[in-house]
Amino acid sequence: MTLAAQAAPDPIGFGLLIAVAIYVVGVIGIVLPVLPGLLLCVGAVLLWAIDTGGTLAWVTFGVALVLYLSGVSLQLLIPGRRMKREGVGGLTLLLGVVGAVIGVVVIPLLGLPIGFVAGIFAAEYLRFHQLDRAWSATKSALRGVLHSMGIELTTALAIAISWTIGILLH
């Protein structure tokens, strides 16, 4: 038997390191919404569960999946309901996303938030032809996006905590 074959197994594991890297990219994707951040976080736990195997790993993934689904539900219910109540429509948000995409092309990095705000403001101004009303709707949409991001980050934290417990117990 060679020395390489007798080497002790890596206690951390390559699969875990890759999963943690994917998780970090997921959290970055929540803050900079270019990637499906929360989905990447759950995918990281799934990768770990596949790599690790065993009942505890799959129960940990199940908990992470339930937390993900709960977070997505809250994300759809709370900010969306508030924005509808304050008169911000789906078309306005779509135009905000279009503005964000254009903004990222025109002004790298800072263009995303600037384009989003400009897109929402332009949509609402064209809709109402009143600066005050357009700005009010823009602020409401921004609050909704920030609430949504907060829900995602809180969900990612809950998933991280449950995953860490699963890793430590495994």
Image (spheres, rainbow, N blue to C red):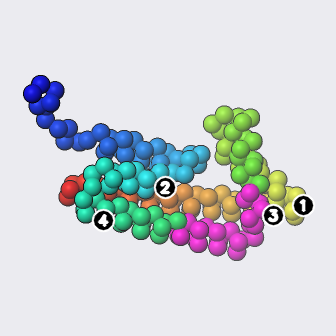
Q: Secondary structure at mark 2?
A: helix
Tell me the CA gap for discs 1 and 3. Answer: 8 Å
Q: Residue shown at 71%/72% (left/top)?
A: 84
Q: Are marks 3 and 4 in contact (CB under 8 Å)?
A: no
Q: Residue shown at 54%/57% (left/top)?
A: 149
Quadrant of the rendered structure where residue 62 is? Answer: bottom left
* Mark earlier in primary sequence (1, 4): 4
Mark 3: few, some, or many residues within 10 Å (few <14, many ≥20)?
Answer: some
Looking at the picture, tell me which residue is in the foreground, 79 or 10: 10
The residue under label 4 is 59
Q: Secondary structure at mark 4?
A: helix
The residue under label 2 is 38
The residue under label 1 is 129
Q: Nearer the viewer, mark 1 or mark 4?
A: 4
Question: How far across and down, in percent of the image, does residue 144 sit?
Answer: 63, 62
**Camera sees residue 84:** yes
Task: Identify which amino acid the numbered label 3 is placed on.
Answer: Arg
Tell me the CA gap for discs 1 and 2. Answer: 37 Å
Residue numbers of the magenta segment: 73-94
Q: Residue shown at 75%/67% (left/top)?
A: 89
**Camera sees residue 117:** no
Task: Identify which amino acid the numbered label 1 is placed on.
Answer: His
Task: Identify which amino acid the numbered label 2 is placed on.
Answer: Leu
Left or right: 39, with 138 as reference point: left
Looking at the picture, tell me which residue is in the foreground, 62 or 159: 62
Task: Identify which amino acid the numbered label 4 is placed on.
Answer: Val
